[in-house]
Amino acid sequence: MWGKVVRLSWVGAPGPLVAMVGLTAVEGLLPPLAAWLTKLLIDELAGGAGASASRVAALAVGVAAAGLLTGLHRSVAHYASGLFSRALRLLTTDRLYQRVNAYVGVARLEDPAFLDRLRLAGQAGAQAPGQLTAAGLALFKGVLQVGGYGAALIAVWPPSVLIVLVAAVPTTVLQIAVSRRQSRLLASLAPSQRHQLALQTLMTDVRAAKEIRLFGFGGFLGERMLADVRDGNAAEAAFERGLLRIEVVLELVSGAVMVAGTAAAAYQAIRGSITVGDVSVFLAALAGVHGSISSITGGCAGVYQALLLFGSYHDIVDTPSERSVAVHDRVGRLRTGVEFRDVWFRYRDDTPWVLRGVTLTIPAGRSIGLVGVNGAGKSTLVKLLCRMYDPQRGQILWDGTDIRDIDPDALRRRITAVFQDFMTYDLTAKENIALGELAQLGDLSAVRTAARAADVDDELAGLPRGYDTLLSRVFAGAADDDVGQLSGGQWQRVALARAFLRSDADLLVLDEPSAGLDAEAEHALHRRLAGLRSGRAGLLISHRLAALRDADEIVVLAGGQVSERGTHAALIGAGGHYARLFALQASGYVTGDLTGAAVVTAEVACDPGVPSIVETAERR
């Protein structure tokens, strides 16, 4: 792991890294050098009238220069450290999210445990390399200082080396104890900190804000969050109390050794065995080695902790690729169609099957309507088609080729879609649409054509800055009044425009494309869709069965299986599940005094399990 960090540091910031190593060497050697120059200066001054003025001046300049270099070093080292940290943060963030974006599907991103690891990896990638480098350099500096002071002490009074080392033992013991206890504390606090973060995020989530205020449970969530904070505070207080007891005892022991050592040095100076300058070196070494040992043990602890943290980053970055070697890295236009052949799928091995042997075909140039109650597997089928997941059994064939043998990016280039849980991006109106075909980002005409197809051009053009208007305050200034606010239905039409911008796609997938639209907008949308689907395959999913009437074939999913298929008229005539759902929806609009409309009436003995969804009028 250490080797990986060194390689990463060298690739990301070779110049700052070399500068930091050099500066650390200077920082490690300056204190012993300053102590030695001070000793020589004191000894020279102790000579009284016999002292050499030029030698005193030179030594004084040397001591002053050492002090000046120490001050300058801090500023330069801080600058180099900033350069290093920023370069490493850029590199690690890029590598992490390149890895995440390379995942073929979304299984990992729907796994809460993986998301916890990903959040930790993001923090580790930004912090751990810098922490690890700083800890390693602190260790290097400490070793240099101990070596420098040791060499000076051996030269003036060899027994003093033992005194200095004994005085540093309590500090070493303290640092080791702190490191171990801190690691245990961090591990014990991790679950409550995750819970606390989740509650904080929830309490500031604009989507949750409405229910929190309406139902008045903000205090309930706040109290749970504060309970986590109290537990953390109690654990930290207990840790600090134990640490305080250890610190007091060890510092008293260290102080006693230092007092005894100082007395011994003074006695040797009185006897004439050592000079006053030698005593100054000894005193400087006592303080310096004490700090250096702390630096060494702290550096070791820091290296250990940073390596653990950095391991979480590499767990993600070094994840083996999901991509198999694609037999086909390019896909031509859809000629025959897409076939689901005995497809079985479930999200985890310990969960029920969502799809159970689904077989259906989406012919090229024709449209399929997909019907089913909630949980029937409709959206799951879309995820499989777009290779967000792969089936456990069966095949999905694109013109007879298993899509697992096709490069995922090449396959997705031939598909455009509006998902049921479509995204609202914190970008401009133009960018929100252009994400569907980034090559068109600079082509406002193409973007507006897609917007007109989705019937949202007038609304976007009328925003304060037209298509350059931000649709979110996330990236806007606090005083920026030129932010566009869209309704849910308008956002859905923006998502449709994003899908329509990819005009060369062979397959158009629309999962509940009109769920957020009013009746008039929905009617207009479905009139446009007939033209937009012309010449390409279409898969349309909707609970509003009237929206599927014009599909070339309607497929009904029930219990993860295809239970019915046929045209609207054929399925109504069959009197099966589709007919019951259709009649149930239509029955909510039956009146006796409608003018100009033929009223659908139906008396159907509906299954108890059929949900009461009355969502649309069916006028003929």
Image (cartoon, grey):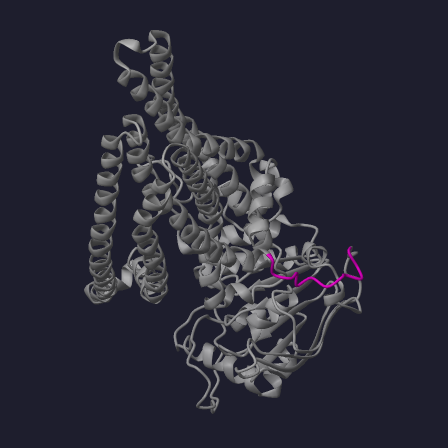
> As rendered, which of 42 and 113 lies closer to the eye?
42
Residue 584: image location, x then y, percent: 46, 81
Residue 9 in the image: state x and y as whole percent. Answer: 56, 42
Q: Identify the residue at horizontal 33%, vertical 52% (top origin).
A: 169
Nearer-the-camera pick, 402 or 164: 164
**SS majority, magenta:** loop
Query: Does the magenta-highlighted stretch encompass residue 357?
Result: no
Residue 193 in the image: above or below residue 87? below
Give yes or no for residue 322 being in the magenta stretch.
Answer: yes
Position of the N terminus, as image quadrant, is bottom right
- The part of the chain drawn in magenta is 318-329
**Count of marks overlaid on the render:** 0
Above or below, 5 relative to 544: above
Left or right, 30 with respect to 359, comes to: left
Q: In which image quadrant can residue 372 be found?
A: bottom right
Image quadrant where residue 212 sits: bottom left
Residue 574 seen in render: yes
Is 355 on the left or on the right of 602, as rendered?
right
- Using the rendered image of the protein, determine whether residue 486 is visible from the camera's viewpoint: no
Q: Position of residue 73 (x, y in %)?
A: 40, 27
Q: Position of residue 422 (x, y in %)?
A: 50, 58
Quarter containing the C terminus:
bottom right
Q: Nearer the viewer, residue 280 or 187?
A: 280
Compared to residue 64, the image places residue 509 above or below, namely below
Indicate left or right for 357 with 375 as reference: right
